[in-house]
Amino acid sequence: MTLAGLTIDRVETFAVPLPTLRPFGVSGGAIAVMGKPSVRILVKVTAGDHFGWGEATPIPAWTYETQESIVSTINGYLAPAIVGRPAWDLDGVTSAFDRAINRGFSIGAPLAKAAVDVALHDLLGRALGVSVGELWGQRRVSSIQLGWVVSGQGPAEVADAVAEGQSLGYQAFKVKIGLGPTDLRIVEAVRNAAGSAPLWVDANQAYSVAEAVQISRALADFGVTAFEQPLPANDIAGLQRLRDLSAVPVALDESLRHPSDMSTFVRLGAVDIAIAKVQRSGGLTLSRRLLQLAEDSGVRLMGSGLTDSDIGLAASLHLFAAFGITTPVDLNGRQFVDSVYVGGDTVKVADGTAYVPTGPGLGIEVDEEKVRRLAL
């Protein structure tokens, strides 16, 4: 199979409500609410006889893109910009996206762009009969250790959450903080329940520099390995100061949307750890550029997701495996949502370890009939 002449014919969006398995909150608000479906925007890109699937996760508590804006952005702007273009031209698609929805300060509509970019990777892999890792010529590991995410309001609640994760074989834990004055009590309770397991915390931009410095000292005493996004994403000067003052290595997530952001933080000496997140960075194309820059600059790498269902989970696993990320990662979709649209083989997760798919494209099968039936 040759990709020459394979042009993008159609881009379709589907807002699919998925069952919510557990409640989940961050400093910005609720991510998943029991009794309320968790909507994911699935995208199908078609080129000739070939197709691929991508996903976007609308979480207004985390970023500005909503279910409605993702659909309208793809249907009204991104799809018209790329229909008729060669399906293999990922670099050209990225440039077309930037012309359709301007980058602004960093990157414009990354979740919408990510869904289409991932679908194109899936399409290309399927067309060639190779996995995404083989498409890139880059897969350094075949499995990724997952962390169980702990988010709760009291020590007893989070201790129960740790026990649940342990019962399912998880041996690393990520704690959501920035939720209130009980943050350190929460971390202490998780440490007591988790024993010597790897433990890191995520503040989702909740603190000032002074607060983060003070909290970091207690986190060090609890053996926390990374302090994720303690300050607002655009507080570059504050993060530069915090890197020198924090007792725990600072990991950046929301601050690193575009590769140019990574370049800025490297030049200023303001980053200890760079977190890979496919949707945040507009898809796999830009994520690879960002991670390559971080790796070449000697910055440590970690991985995270956006409560993705199985399409996003597979995409993240290919990315993290390509760069050999061996520290536990936060790919928590399986913990909070049920990917009922998946048919046939899916991503294998056992005892807190996810195995990188090896089938064509992303390596998962989507039940299109069910997607169309479920779509809002």
Image (cartoon, grey):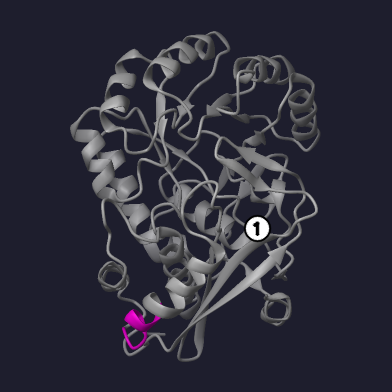
Q: How many marks?
A: 1
| Residue matched to label 1 | 347
Q: Is residue 374 left or right of residue 231?
A: right
Mark 1 residue type: Val
> Which residue ends up furthest to the left in the rendered image?
267
In the image, what residue occupies the spot 70% across and 70% down? 341
Which residues are drawn in magenta? 79-85
Image x and y of residue 231, in percent: 40, 29
In the image, what residue occupies the spot 32% across and 21% down? 243
Name the quadrant of the C terminus: bottom right
Asked if residue 18 is among those painted magenta in the image, a careful observer would answer no
In the image, what residue occupies the spot 53% across and 48% down? 305
Question: Is residue 269 positioned above or below 146 on the image?
Answer: above
Image x and y of residue 164, in percent: 79, 33
Q: Quadrant of residue 254?
A: top left
Q: Is residue 305 left or right of residue 81?
A: right
Image x and y of residue 26, in percent: 59, 37
Question: Is residue 61 positioned above or below 46 on the image?
Answer: above
Q: Closer to the camera, 338 or 342? A: 338
Which type of secondary structure does the marked residue at label 1 adopt?
loop
Question: Is residue 328 positioned above or below 306 on the image?
Answer: above
Question: Is residue 265 positioned above or below 39 on the image?
Answer: above
Q: Is residue 162 left or right of residue 245?
A: right
Q: Residues within 10 Å of mark 1 (few under 14, many from 20)?
A: many
Image x and y of residue 251, in percent: 41, 31
In the image, what residue occupies the spot 45% across and 65% down? 112
Q: Is residue 177 left or right of residue 278?
A: right
Name the quadrant of the N terminus: bottom left
